Image (cartoon, rainbow, N blue to C red):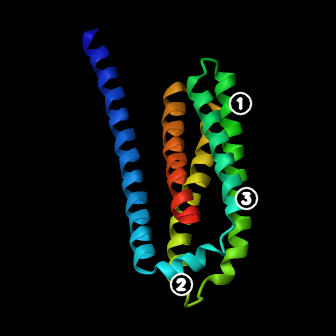
Amino acid sequence: MAVIGDTVEDEADGGELILWLLVWSELAAFGVLLGGFLVMSYLHHESFSLAKIHLDSRLASINTLVLIASGWLAAEAARADAERTRTIALLGAATLGFLFTAIKLLEYREELRFVGDATFNAFFELYFMITGFHLAHVVFLGLVMLLVARKPSRSNVVLVTTIWHVIDIVWLVIFPVIYLG
């Protein structure tokens, strides 16, 4: 009987290790991208400052609030004891993630006209790379939350909501660095 208990515990520890490896790899990837943005912003201060004028910080601010609300729902899903509550919270978090996506695409529509402009080229290449990579994570994790909501076991909910919070935190760094800095 002790062997079975140890095996289950070992499996839980292994799952937790994989989760934290994923969390740290995400943070490292975004850290490298944002570090590159900051270096380029320093080296090309004038063109980056001019390019930032063309960003819609109002939409980005709304998106920040949307992701914070989504993160709150994700936290509620992770805290919930009742499966129904977890499902509703996950569906709400995913829906807000897709709202974030829609707002970001609306923002992109206005910014795409600056792609290829020699004055802003480096800024918008990095901007679309960083925010696009983040957006891909939001869409993917939103879809995963929808899948997990079908059968929201505690371990799956904790896994997806932990990664969701990491992506929220990444946005809370992207927002001031790109839009306000």
Residue 30 horizontal side relative to residue 143, left or right: left
Closer to the camera in the image, 101 or 38: 38
Q: Residue at x 57, y 23 (%)?
A: 79
Closer to the camera in the image, 110 or 83: 110
Q: Is residue 153 above or below residue 138?
A: above
- Helix, strand or loop under label 2: helix
Q: Residue at x 57, y 62 (%)?
A: 180
Name which residue type carries label 3.
Answer: Ala
Q: Residue furthest bottom?
A: 118
Q: Residue furthest left?
A: 3
Q: Tell me the quadrant of the picture where the N terminus can be found.
A: top left
Which mark sits nearer the N-terminus, 3 or 2?
Answer: 3
Q: CA distance from mark 1 to mark 2?
A: 43 Å
Q: CA distance from mark 3 to mark 2?
A: 24 Å
Name which residue type carries label 2.
Answer: Asn
Name which residue type carries label 1.
Answer: Ile
Q: How many marks?
A: 3
